[in-house]
Amino acid sequence: MLIDTHSHLNFNSFKDDAHRLLGRCLAEDIWMINIGTNLVTSKKAVELASRYSQGVYAAVGLHPISLDTGLVKIKPEEDDFFEKEFDYEKYKELAQNSKVVALGEIGLDYWYKPKAKSKRPEFKKRQKDLFVQQLDLADELNLPVIIHCRMAFDDLFEVAKAKTPKGVIHCFSGTWEQAKQFLDLGFYLGLNGIIFKLELDEVIKKMPADKILIETDCPYLTPPQEEGRNEPGFIKHIVQKIANVRGESFDEIAEVSSKNARSLFGI
Ligand SMILES: [Zn+2]
């Protein structure tokens, strides 16, 4: 068994064949969690999961990039729907669906920032407020969180340390020093196709096995062994690479990462 803990079959790239892919994955004993990034994609994730008795789950949340602060211009991609503020009650209702296993993806993303330096503190504050609201919702519902962090390590670590949620740092791409800081707070680290692009061998080698989660982040981050759109089935390349770097077998990584996912998400 393999569990892709971060996929987006709820995105437009899969609108014609999500169910065909899901059927194939389940037949190959690959489970997955589809992750929302706004109300539209979060609802789609829940709808997809509702059709399956086992093996397909959902996370709901408002991605920091989907927050319309009015302070920065972002060219929307097809799955981007901007929200002016976090509708706590709407997300709460959605998150109470039995197929929802986490709040996510939530966090901080300072990749796009206001051109005027004077507006940046306000921009960061809006994202931090959004993050805290969603951590509070996760806490209220006793759900783990799936955290997105880009160009915002220090601020994110500060909030995480103060709020101590349980969850995973998805698409981990930092240094071993940064990894250790999150591991000390009890976080899992999500490893995906970025491990083929960045030098993450030290993190992969040194991190404890009981904190490894595997993910594809499909349709993004296709492993170099494949072409075009990423898919949950390509998770096997991630497992093989982790196994090679750690000097362990494919089966050992498959087993421990599945056990970790089942324990964190209660599936
Ligand atoms: Zn994602």
Image: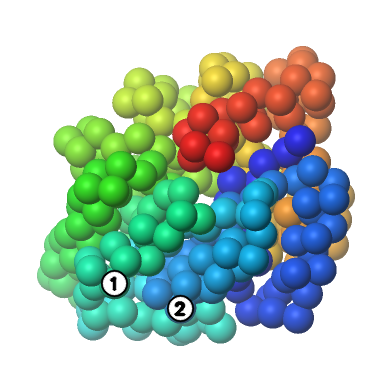
Q: With 23 as the anchor, is 68 left or right in this view?
A: left
**Badge 1 or badge 2: first in the primary sequence:** 2
Residue 217 to residue 116: above or below: above
Q: Which amino acid does label 2 sit on?
A: Val
Q: What residue type is labelled 1?
A: Lys
Element carrying mark 2: helix
Q: Can residue 171 be seen in this view?
A: yes
Q: Is residue 194 visible?
A: no
Asked if ligand 1 lies within 8 A of label 1, the reply is: no
The residue sitting at 42% across, 60% down in the picture is: 97
Quadrant in which the C terminus appears: top right
How is this picture coloured? Answer: rainbow
Residue 70 to residue 256: above or below: below
Q: With 245 as the anchor, is 215 left or right in this view?
A: left
Q: How many labels does the image show?
A: 2
- From the top left corner, tell me how far across and down residue 15 is, in percent: 69, 79
Q: Nearer the viewer, residue 117 or 225?
A: 225
Callout in the foreground (1, 2): 1
* Quarter residue 95 falls in: bottom left
Number of other residues with Cα within 10 Å of mark 2, as a class: few under 14, some 14 to 19, many 20 or more: some
The residue identified by callout 2 is: 40
The residue sitting at 25% across, 44% down in the picture is: 139
- From the top left corner, tell me how far across and down residue 229 is, in percent: 76, 67
Residue 165 to residue 210: above or below: below
